[in-house]
Image (cartoon, grey):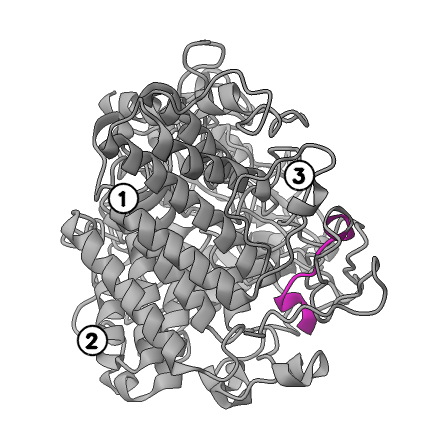
Amino acid sequence: MMNTRKIVGFATALLAAVLIFTGCSDQFLQDKKDYTKVTDPYSNYATAEAAINGIYALALSNSTASFGWRFSSAGSSDIYSQSTEEYSGLSALVDQDVTITTSGDGSLPNVFYNERKTSTNLYGFIFSCNDAIESIPASTGLTQEEKDKLIGQAYFFRAWVYYRLVKEYGGVPIVTKVQNPISGEVDALTIPRSTTKACIDFICEDLQTASTLLPSSWSGNNYGRVTAGAALALQGRTRLLYASPVFNRADNKDRWEAAYQSNKNAIAELKAAGFGLAYADAPGVNASGWGKMFSDFSSTEAVFVTLYNNVNKGTNTTPELWNGWEKAIRPTNANGGGGKNTTDLMIDLFPMADGKKPGQSSFTYNKNLFMINRDPRFYRTFAFPGVYWRFSGDPTTNPPSSAYPYKGSDYALWNYAWYDTADKRTAMDQSGYSGDGLAENYKGVYIRKRTDDLDINATPLYVYKVDKGNGFEQSASPYMEIRYAEVLLNFAEAACGAGYYSEALEALRDIRKRVGYTGECGLDNALAGDRGGLFAAILYERQIELAYEGKRFDDMRRWMLWDGGVGQASIQPTWALTGFNANTCTYLGVKPFNGNRRGLVELCVTVKNGVVGNATATDPYNATRPAAWNLATQTLSDRADLVKFYTDSLTRKDRIGDDLTKTVSFQPQYYFIGLKSNAQTNNPTLEQTVGWADIIKGGTGTFDPLAE
C-alpha cells in the first residue's frame, strides 16, 4: 500500500543509520571526529544525512518504551504513569514503603547516566549533535541549503535532549562543544551544572535557531523529519515548563508571557505550514475522526512524530522497525499481547456528553452503566464488553483457543467475568474468568487509545499474523510525541497564566469541537473570569485529550498535584509556594493525588450471583447477548438492547489495582530527581540536588534548581 511504502522510506533510513553510525561499545565517541577518525561523514550530503539520521534513531520517542535514560514516557505502564491515575500498581515513586536514594539501587529514575564513552546516554546524543553543529559549516561538499537543513535538525535534537534533562533535574551541565574523551583530558569534560534558567534559555535559543534553518514541511520520503513548527512547538513546551509552579513558585507573570508568545508563534508557523486539528470538520460518530488520526500517515496533527514500518524480518536491505503498541493493547483472543487495564479513576473522571464532570453534569452518572452519555473520546480511549474492535486478519485458521469464534472482521469484545467460588466473586483482590477464549487472560476495561481500528481505517498499517500473542506486532502506525492538540493546550495554559483568558477558553473549545461538541462545549463563559478555574479546566482537558500519551506525569509534576506543593518548605524554606495560594491543589480546586488507591473495573455476570464455574464453564450469555456495538455508525442511544443487557445481566466490581494496605504517597523531594552517585563519580564538579543525600561528598545536596 502507498502509505506503507512511504513509511518504509524515512523509518528505514533511521534504523540503517543507527546500525552504521553507532554502537554500544566504548569506542562510540572514539570513532567520531576527535581523533583516529578515518572518514568524514559530513563530506557529502548522503553520509551527512545518514549521520543526522543516526541522531533521530537514538533520540526519537518509542511508542511502547517505558521511561528511561533513552526514551520519554509514551503511554505504557512505567514508573511515571504508575504514579498517576492512568495505571495501577504502585511505582517506587508513590510506594510509601520505598525510599528512593541516589546510591544506585535501581529505583531512582535515571536520565543523566554519565558514562562519557558510550552512545547509550543523553550526553552521547549531545556529542553527536555538537559534532554536526561544529563540522557541517566547514564542509566543502555541501550547499548552504543542505547545511541549513542538517544543522537545523542537530540544533533541534540537542534542545530535545536538554529539555528531557531539565524537566527531571533542573539545571544540568551545558556542553556546546565536542568533548574529547582521550584519557588525560578529564578537566575539559568535568563541566558543572548551570542554573535552570540558563538551561531554559539555552534550549530556547537552540530551538529558535532551528526554526530559522528548518523547512516548514518535508515531502516524500523525508516526511517525519523535524520542522520549523516542531522547533517552535518544543520551545513553547519548554517555556511552559519553566512558567509552571514546580519552577515558578511565585507565579511570575513574565514567564507565562514568554510561554504565551512562544506557543502563539508555534501555532502561527504550524497553521501556515498546513498543520492543524485532524478531522476538525469531520468528527464522525463517537469521535471516529479523532480515533483515526492515530493510525493516519502524514496527519496534519503530527508535529513531532516517530515513524515505523511493517516490513518482514530478515530482508537485509530493509531492517524492520515495528510499533508495538497495537500488539500490546489487543486482547489475547485476537492474538494480541493481552491488553492493558485502565483504572477506575480514569473511567469515572471522563466528562459526560455535555462536557461536564460526572456529578456536575445534567446527565446522571451510573457507575454500573459507565459507558452511557460520555464524552465522545471515552469510546476511543477504552474498550468494554459489547463493542466491536475489528481488525484485518483471520485468526480462526489457528485460533488462540478452541473457544475462539471470530474472524477479524467480526471481532467483538465480550470480556464480562464470572467466578468459580462466591469468595472470589466478592474478594477485592480476586479476578475470575471470561469467555470467547479469554479465560483468565482478560482485562476488565481495556485501553483502546491509539488503536488501528478496521471500522475507521480500512487500510490498517499492520501486517496481521496468525501467531499467538504476536498478531499485531508488525505495525507501522506512527507515534506523535507532539501533536497539534497539545500545542493548543500549551497555548491555552500559557494564555491563562498571562491573563489572556478568552484566548485560552477559545482554544479549549476548538479542541472539543473537533470531537463533536457545539456551543460552549461544556465550558462556561464564567471561566474567563476565574484564573484558577480556567487553569483547572485546561489541566482536565489535557488529562482527557492526551490520556495514555505519556503526558500526565509531567503535568502532575509541573503543577505539584500529589500534595499541592505544601511539603516544599520542609526541604528548603525558599522553596515554599508564594503564588497559587501557597497550594496548587487548593488553587485549582482539586484534591491532592496522595492518599488515593487505584482500582480495576470488571463487569460481572449476575446469573447465579456470578458463580458460574472456571475457565472451562459454558458462557452463560453466549446465546442470548445482543449484537455488539459498532462505534463508527451507532450511538448508544441506538442500542437500547445493549443498555438493557448491561442493566439486567452485568454488575460492576471494583478490584484492587494497587495494594490493599497502601495508598499513593509521592514524597516532596521527588519533584526534582537527584543525581545517581555514578554521575558525581564521573564528574566531581557536579553538585547533588537539594533534598537528596550526597553520598560522594557527604551531607545533603547543594544545587538549587530554583536559584537563578
Q: Where's residue 150, x and y in %?
A: 33, 34
Counting residues from the N terminus, which is met first, the one under dot 3 or under dot 1?
A: 3
Q: Up-down: is 272 above or below 309?
A: below
Q: Which residue is mark 3?
A: 116
Q: Is residue 512 left or right of residue 413?
A: left
Residue at 78% in and 59% down: 101
Give left or right: position of 243 versus 658: left
In the image, what residue type sits under mark 3? Arg
Q: If you read the primary sequence from the N terminus, does the residue marked by circle 2 or circle 3 appear first?
A: 3
- The residue to which callout 2 is attached is 520
Quarter of the figure with the C terminus? bottom right
Residue type, numbered disc 2: Glu
- Determine contact: label 3, label 1, CB under 8 Å: no
Q: CA distance from mark 3 to mark 1?
A: 30 Å
Q: Which mark is residue 213?
A: 1
Residue 629 in the image: above or below residue 422: above
**Which amino acid type corresponds to the residue marked 1 in the rendered image?**
Leu
Determine whether the residue tagged by mark 1 lies in a helix, strand or loop: helix
Point out residue 296 in the picture as x, y percentages from the top left corner: 28, 37
Q: Secondary structure at mark 2?
A: loop
